[in-house]
Each structure stands twice: as structure tokens, then as C-alpha cells.
Image (cartoon, rainbow, N blue to C red):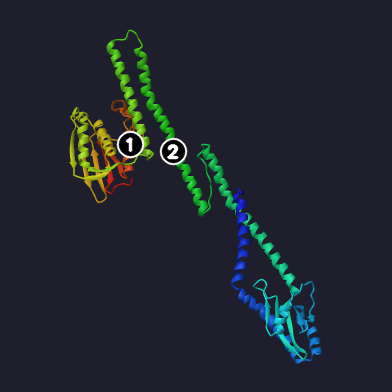
Amino acid sequence: MIRSLYTRVVLIFLVSVIGGTAISFFAATWVFKDQLNENLRIPLLSFGQDIARIYETLPLDEAEAFVSGMNQLNSYHVHIYDETGQVQSYGVIKGHNPAVVTMEQVNKVLGGEIVQVNPSGVSTTLLGLPFTTETGTRAMFVEPVSPPSAPFITTWILNFAIVALVTGSLFTLIAAIFLVKPIKKLTRATRRVAGGDFNVKLNIRQKGELGTLARSFEDMMHDLQQLEQMRRDFVSNVSHEIQSPLTSISGYALALKQVNIADNERSRYLDIIIAEADRMSKMSDSLLKLSLLESQSQLLQLVAFNLDEQIRRVIVAIQPQWSARNITFELHLNAIRVMADHDLLNQVWTNIIGNSIKFSPDGGVVNVAIKQDIKSVIVRISDTGIGISPEDQKRIFERFFKADRSHSRKYGGSGMGLAIVKQIVSLHQGDIRVESEPGRGTTVIVALPLKTPAK
């Protein structure tokens, strides 16, 4: 099996040229065989008729002498049979093997028929025709003999074909070098990428398919580089987030081993251990949930339901969070029915409204409104909380990202809630964005398409 593309290109060229030439030759011969046969037959017939008129016009001795001196005998060989089977030949053989004439053919010609022999179906190699002399009817067979220039023409055609193939092969070899060179670059780049090196520059400026392939490869390397950076950030963030509760659990567990610890201190240490373990459990659940959503292996369970009713139920379900802080809600919920995954959207509203409550001051107001346009349903959830800086708004939907770094201990959270929300909205082919100013609150806008998203 030939593995080299370079060799394949050259062989394909040779096979294409030789095979195409041969097929074209045989196809043209088959299509025009009647015309070719007729063109070859006419000179033989004309020459034979000229000889017949000589024999019919001149006395036999003079006719034979005249025919034997004809210059056309350099291109034709003539056999003349009488009624007794005697044969007289004219023309020089010069290494040419004369055609075999059978007595059946001789008798047909003597009987007045014209006999034409076409062994290949294309070329006429033997033509027999009758003529009359003073001694009776005779059968004349004329066959073409290759002229002196025929070997030269054959040699010239052969040399031309060889030179054409060699020249074409050289051009193909040179072209193949330029064809294979960028592919070799891609091969080397692939090996470097496989080894973890994504800083590869191809510098392939060709157009067409190879240029498109090179640009696609560079785009792929850029995406892989981003994915690798995201993977490193993810590992770093997970390690950092897990390290904090593990340190607390380990420290307070060691403290519990002290013999003289007071009961109230023991109880406080146990509460801290339980709280940190619960935080790790929630973090683990969030990671699994986000991983499932990002892999898109989660199929949407589409059902029809009232979106306004769902949001009201979410607000009622988390009443302990906002009633304890005297936070009020202003609702502008039009009755709108949607086709979506009920459980996933329920998590969206729970996370967003929960954040609005968490970052709002005591006695604050959370505004929730629904409206519908031609293509989508738009939900706006606004609060009067601490707000988000423009720099943090660009990263608010990244996993583990916390905009409230200076208040992280006060507000808590794993930083994955909005990442999960973003992924759920994307699965519904929707869009989510944030409008916020520090100290003046935040508005989260969710747009869901009216058309049922494909599963």
C-alpha cells in the first residue's frame, strides 16, 4: 500500500494520462470505425480499379510490364490470380508479411464479387476485385504496405509520448512538493498540539482547500488553547474552593480531640464542620449539574405551563429568605404560557431571585416583570442591591466567579449558580444578560424563544 501522498499524486497523474489516452484512442476508433474503414478502403479500391483498366485496355504483356514499373507498388502489394489458380505478384515485400489469400476468396472474386478483409474491424488489410483480360477473368488482391515514412512516424509518436510523460511527471513532482509541504507542516503541528503545545504558527498562505484547512486548524488550536486555560482555571478554582472548607473541617476536627473543651465550644465546632461539609456537598452537586448541562447530554423535558405561575411559586417557596429581611416584591406578571423544561427553568428563577434577595439591603425591593414580543418572552428581575462593576459583568456567568470579592464571606456561595443559569437558558436557545451599576442595583434579563426549542 502506497502511503506517501507525494507518490500517490505522481502515480495518479501517470495513470490518468496513460489511461485517458488509451481510453480516448479506443473510444474514438470505435465511434469512427466506419469512417476510418471507408477512408482506408477508398485508396485500395481506386488503385485496384486503375490496374484493372490497364489490363482491360492494353495487351497482356504490355499491361504486366506497365504495372510492374508503377511507383505506387512501394505502398501496395498486388496478387493476381487466374482461373487455374496461377498467381502473379507485384511490389517489393521489404520485410512485410503478405496477407494470406484463400481459394475461397479467389473463387468469390472470380465469380464477380468484391472481397474486403477487415481482421480488426477498423483497417482494411486486403481488397479483392475482379477484372477481365484477353485471356479471361482474373482476381486481383491489393493490400497496403507501410510506406518508408511509417517507421519514422511510429518512432516519432513514441518519442513524443515518452517526452510528454517525462515532462508532465517532472511538473507533477514539482507541483506535488508544493502540495505536500503544507500538509507536512500540518502533520508537525498536530504532533506539537498532541504534546500540549498550542503556540504553533503554520504560516500557510495558500488559498483553496489547503488554505481553508490551515485556517480551520489554527482556529482549532485557538479553541484548544482556550479550553486548556479553562481546564487549568477550573482545577485551580476547584482546588481553592475545596481547600477552604477542608481546612476548616480538619482544624475543628482536631480541636474536638481536646479533652478539656467546653460543651458549648464542642457544639459550635460541630456546627461549623456540618456547615462546611454541607457547602462542599452543594458545591459537588453544582459541579455535577453544570457538567451534565455543558455536555448537552441532558435532554429537555418539554411541557407546556404558565410561566407567570411558575415564578409566583418560586417566590412563595423562598419566602423565608425575603420575609426575614423585610424585602418586598413588585410583580408585573402577564399570563404567558410557554413550552419548556419546567424543572430546569424553576432552577433559573430560584437562582436569579435568590441572588437578588441575597445582595439587596434589608427592606429592599425586588421587581419581577414578564412581557412578550413577536419572537420571545422576556423576564426582567431587578433589585436595589450592591450592583456589579462593568469589569465583573463580563465574567459574571463564569463558573466560580464571584463579583463580590470583598464581601465573599458575608454573602457566601460557590460562584456556580449563574453559570448553571446561563447553560440552562442556552439549552432553551434563549439569551441572558445583566444590566447593573455599583450601588444602584442589578437587572437580569432572560429572553426565551416562543418557538419550542428542538430536543
Where's residue 336, x and y in %? 21, 45
Determine if residue 396 is in view.
Answer: no
Badge 2 crowding class, 10 Å Cα cut-off, few under 14, some 14 to 19, many 20 or more, is few
Determine if residue 191 is in view.
Answer: yes
Q: Which mark is residue 227?
A: 2
Question: Who's the residue at 46% across and 45% down the image?
Answer: 219
Q: Amino acid at mark 2?
A: Leu
Nearer-the-camera pick, 339 or 126 = 126
Whether 323 is drawn above or below 226: the answer is above
Question: Who's the residue at 72% across and 81% down the image?
Answer: 107
Nearer-the-camera pick, 407 or 193 = 193
Badge 1 crowding class, 10 Å Cα cut-off, few under 14, some 14 to 19, many 20 or more, is many
In the displayed orientation, state which residue is furthest to the top.
260
Q: Which mark is residue 420?
A: 1
The quarter of the image holding the C terminus is top left
Q: Quadrant of residue 105?
A: bottom right
Q: Quadrant of residue 445?
A: top left
